[in-house]
């Protein structure tokens, strides 16, 4: 995750994750949410697809 500098009076920054890091430089990663597993895929065109 990349840190962002945010003034104290501002709203906290939204967490940012680099998709290539999530996939270990590949094109697939599994993401778990509340016991459900989702697949994140980076297409040849550089688009992201998240499926259950």
Image (spheres, rainbow, N blue to C red):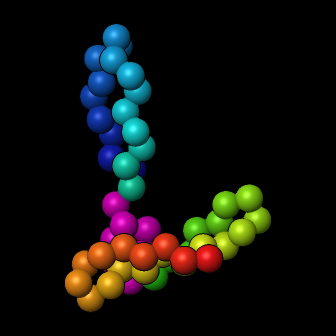
Question: Can you say whether 35 is above or below 16 in the image?
Answer: below
Q: Residue furthest top?
A: 9
Q: Position of residue 30 (x, y in %)?
A: 57, 75
Q: Residue furthest bottom?
A: 44
Q: Position of residue 31 (x, y in %)?
A: 58, 68
Residue at (29% x, 17% y) in the render:
7
Q: Position of residue 24 (x, y in %)?
A: 40, 75
Question: Can you say whether 39 is above or below 16 in the image?
Answer: below
Question: Can you say whether 51 is above or below 22 in the image?
Answer: below
| Left-right relation of 40 to 30 | left
Q: Quadrant of residue 22?
A: bottom left
Magenta-tinted stretch: 18-27
> 49 and 3: which one is in front?
49
| Left-right relation of 8 to 45 | right
Q: Magenta stretch containing residue 6, yes or no?
A: no
Q: Quadrant of residue 20?
A: bottom left
In which quadrant of the rendered image does the C terminus lie?
bottom right
Question: Can you say whether 13 is above or below 26 in the image?
Answer: above
Q: Position of residue 8 (x, y in %)?
A: 35, 13
Q: Main secondary structure of the magenta part?
A: loop
Q: Magenta stretch containing residue 20, yes or no?
A: yes
């Amino acid at each position: 995750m990349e840190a962002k500098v945010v003034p104290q009076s501002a709203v906290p920054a939204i967490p940012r994750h680099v998709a290539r890091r999530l996939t270990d430089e590949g094109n697939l990663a599994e993401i778990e949410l509340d016991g459900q597993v989702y697949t994140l895929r980076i297409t040849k065109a550089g688009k992201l697809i998240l499926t259950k």
